Image: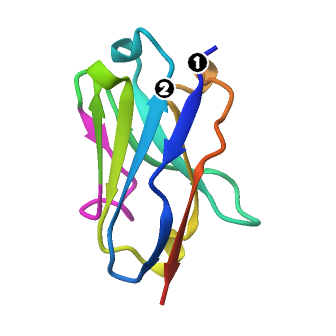
Amino acid sequence: QVQLVESGGGVVQAGGSLRLSCATSSRIFSVYDMAWYRQAPGNQREWVASISTDSDTDYPDSMKGRFTISRDNAKSTVYLQMNGLKPEDTARYYCNNAVPRYQWPWGQGTQVTVSS
């Protein structure tokens, strides 16, 4: 089982930036499409960004231009650079395999809180 450890969250003011990291225990990380998700209290988990094995990226329209996903295969780590943060971005952020049927047990996530 691949383990996922997210970090980098915190409390920032609206307009601020954060860089999240997700370290995985996978030894074949480079073969997986990866994604970031988030979940706010009372809401379902939602997709935030994804990156393919070829480093092609995709985002929901609401996050395009503000969020950037990247990966370092040598470190088995995926990143999420978040700029222009808004209070509605407040949530717990998670990473996982981008393909639902291949997803591993979820990590603890990292909390992002954006104050207005």
Q: Are marks 1 and 2 in contact (CB under 8 Å)?
A: yes
- Residue 66: in magenta span: yes
Please tell me how crowded label 1 is: few (under 14), some (14-19), or many (20+) other residues with Cα within 10 Å. Answer: some
Q: Which residue is mark 2?
A: 24
User: In which quadrant of the rendered view does residue 76 lie?
Assistant: top left
Query: Is 91 placed above or below 46 here?
Result: below
Q: Position of residue 13 (x, y in %)?
A: 41, 83
Mark 1 / mark 2, whichever is N-terminal: 1
Please tell me which residue is depicted at 39% across the width and 65% down the height of the picture: 62
Give the camera-side residue of 114 and 41: 114
- Residue 6: in magenta span: no
Q: CA distance from mark 1 to mark 2?
A: 7 Å
Q: Position of residue 11 (x, y in %)?
A: 50, 74
Q: Which mark is residue 95?
A: none
Query: Is 85 placed above or below 60 here?
Result: below
Three-letter residue code for mark 2:
Thr
Q: Position of residue 68 (x, y in %)?
A: 28, 51
From which residue to which does the magenta span run? 56-67
Secondary element under disc 1, as helix, strand or loop, is loop
Secondary element under disc 2, as helix, strand or loop, is strand
Q: Position of residue 86 (x, y in %)?
A: 43, 78
Give the camera-side residue of 46 and 87: 87
Q: Which residue is mark 1?
A: 2
Quadrant of the rendering where the N terminus is positioned: top right
